[in-house]
Amino acid sequence: MSQDDLKNTHSEVKKLGNNSNMGSVNTGPKESKKANKSQYKTILMIFISILAGFFGGWVGGQNKQLNLDTKNSTQQQIIASESQLINQIAKDVGPSVVSVNVSSTARSTNPFGGVGEVQQESAGTGVIISKEGVIITNRHVIPATTEKVSVTLSDGTTFEDVKVIGRTNDNDSLDIAFLKINDSKGKKLPPATIADSSKVQVGDKVVAIGNALGQFQNTVTSGIISGYGRDVQASDGSGAGVETLQNLFQTDTAINQGNSGGPLVNTNGEVIAINTAVAGNAENIGFAIPTNDIAGLIDSVLTKGELLRPYLGVRYISLTDDVAVQYDLDVKRGAYLAPADPGTETIISDSPADKAGLREGDIIVKVDDTSIDEKNSLTSVLGRKSVEDKVTLTVIRDGKEITLDATLEATPKN
């Protein structure tokens, strides 16, 4: 309200007071003074209200700005804390991560149709898992035709005398190999801490460390676990050497060529998986082998000095709701020993499964006390066992539950 409005209001009040000789109302001087005093109070109250409104708006604006400043400050603190965390993980785990350089032979065909061999160089990543220099990496980093391996530490130290302890078979669902530095030359080799991967949840923050593109040592990327229990068909991109990998973690952490064999670590700096593959037709979808799936292999290498893969001897299909419908099964989770194509065995002859009495059509729903489901495939559960372990298999056969005992053996070399 403007001052002119206030004057007009005051004038109007006074005018009404001066022209009130109406009816029987007495409008003498005393009553007129009281009316004037009342009108002044009204004007004062209006002025105070306007002032209060202005002041309240100003205070509210200051509070809003304060809230925005506080929110921005909090966001900056979160970003700074996350950066510091990743930086600390890189410092803690980095010394345990090595670049793996490989010389191998490959078949080549000349323009005239002749076939020969050529030398090829490749690179990947590995993780030190013992102070004696044992390293875990991927099988595809160490081809079967490997002739020489060297490893380089994060500080640039290179070791040429490196032994291939062993690698899983090319048709094995675990893409794993082990190396050993024979002579550390007095250099300390800090092992990474291996975590229990069964505790990993979708959404967990993770960091990948590796020799990206075979050129950059200890590149660090971060993301989350976006899925688990993934089965994929992997190849080198040419369509050759396709292999089936099972029960993998899926992550949106950038995993590039050269990162293969490197660690996927949690926020405690513990290795929860070994990076192994990426989806070629998608953005930032990578896959890693959970550490629990290779616990038995790690144990055999560290305790016996050789890679001994626990072996049951079956081909199976992991059951889901959709797969159960497809095969008209009442059981929705488990390892289904589906009838195989002609010339292929579902139950490998003379294998532990064969000796235990497993048959085509059986569904393995439990190994000892562990149920077979999305988080625990048969491959995963057996990977936690060791050669010569005795296991009790809970099996659904013809709609009835039975139990069979099996003794795991070492996987045949062929």
Image (cartoon, rainbow, N blue to C red):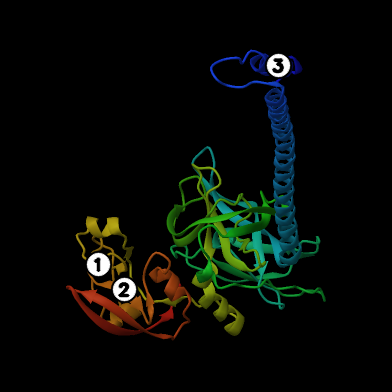
* Front tag of 3 and 1: 3
Disc 3, SS:
helix
Residue drawn at 43 percent across, 74 percent down: 381
Q: Secondary structure at mark 1?
A: loop
Quadrant occupied by the C terminus: bottom left
Taking the spot 74% from the left edge, 73% from the top edge, the residue there is 190
Q: State the image coordinates of residue 339 (x, y, percent, origin top left).
A: 23, 64
Mark 3 surroundings within 10 Å by alpha-carbon count, few (fewer than 14), some (14 through 19), many (20 or more): few
- Above or below 203: residue 375: below
Q: Quadrant of residue 409?
A: bottom left
- Spatial CA distance of label 2 from label 3 is 87 Å
Report if residue 144 is visible in the image. Answer: no
Whether 324 is drawn above or below 239: the answer is below
Q: Residue at label 1? A: 331
Mark 2 neighbour class, 10 Å CA radius: few under 14, some 14 to 19, many 20 or more: many
Mark 2 or mark 3, which is nearer to you?
A: 3
How dense is the environment of label 1, judged by Cα within 10 Å: few (below 14), some, or many (20 and up)?
Answer: some
Q: Earlier in the sequence, mark 3 or mark 1?
A: 3
Q: Which residue is mark 2?
A: 365
Q: x, y (%) of residue 333?
A: 31, 66
Q: What amino acid does circle 1 point to?
A: Val
Residue flagged by tag 3: what amino acid is it? Asp
Nearest the eye: 156 or 108: 156
What residue sits right under mark 3 in the picture?
5
Residue 95 occupies which quadrant of the picture? bottom right
CB contact under 8 Å: marks 1 and 2:
yes
Q: Is residue 224 visible?
A: yes
List x then y, in percent, for residue 299.
Answer: 56, 80
At label 2, the amino acid type is Val
